[in-house]
Image (tube, rainbow, N blue to C red):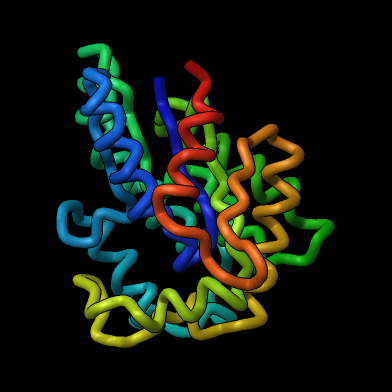
Amino acid sequence: MIIAFEGIDGSGKGTQSAALAGYLNEKGADNVLFSFPDYEGTLFGGEVAKYLNGGYGDMASLPAEFPAMLYALDRFEMKKDIEAALKAGKIVIFDRYVPSNFVYQAAKLPEKARVAFIDWVKKMEYGLLGLPEPDCVFFLDVPPSVSRAMVLKKSVRAYTSQKEDIHERDGGYMEAVYGAYRKTAVQDGWRVINCVENGRLLPRDAVLASIIKSLPF
């Protein structure tokens, strides 16, 4: 069983994926949590960090395929560990997975080019690289107006000394990513978790309760 958490930056993916792992542990369900990108644990995770810090230039100067390949190869480096966990019968939980890649990069493109690009990323990650497809994807629905405040509250992160990386500081881009996530969630049948009420983020346990109710087992 593979469960992936998706959503824009600051939507609570790390918090909720860890909370679900803890809940499953309490219930005696063996599980393992992977967080992508693995900035310090893989070679290509380090390259993703370089990209997010502007080391390869600004987003507009790079074809969407370039960062997509960096993110994909970061996951590929962890493929053996993922397969080993699945073979051992563990529930695998992802804090970001393949959907992050095709949504974030497709959001940079004109609408008419997005379907073909998403198909290309899926063929690369699930096909060529052989990464397993998720059984369940949770989309944590938090609009940019709320998520940006959460990003700015974060302590210093391992991959950057900046308060916002090149994705996060571009408000228009994050709006496009959010819109692409919402559309893809409907098209691909993801489980949508509403995390905001009256413009404020719901408490962690309230969101977790909704996630638990939506588990496929």
Residue 199: x and y, percent? Answer: 63, 72
Q: Could you tell whether 86 is left or right of 3 in the image?
A: left
Residue 207: x and y, percent? Answer: 49, 48
Q: Nearer the viewer, residue 27 or 177?
A: 27
Asked if one can make out residue 96 in the rendered structure from this viewpoint, the answer is: yes
Residue occupying the point 32% across, 28% down: 92
Residue occupying the point 36% across, 44% down: 17
Residue occupying the point 57% across, 46% down: 139
Q: Could you tell whether 134 is left or right of 93 in the image?
A: right
Residue 171: x and y, percent? Answer: 61, 83
Asked if one can make out residue 177 in the rendered structure from this viewpoint, the answer is: no
Residue 159: x and y, percent? Answer: 24, 72
Q: Which of 132 and 209 is in front in this view?
A: 209
Residue occupying the point 16% across, 60% down: 40
Look at the picture and state if 108 lies above or below 211. below
Query: As drawn, which residue projects farthest toward the right?
Result: 112
* Total tally of numbered discs in the picture: 0
Q: Nearer the viewer, residue 80 or 200?
A: 200
Look at the picture and state if 86 lies above or below 194. above
Q: Could you tell whether 141 is left or right of 16 in the image?
A: right
Look at the picture and state if 181 lies above or below 85. below
Is the N terminus in the top left, top right, bottom left or bottom right quadrant? top left
* Quarter of the figure with residue 122: top right
* Quarter of the figure with residue 70: bottom left
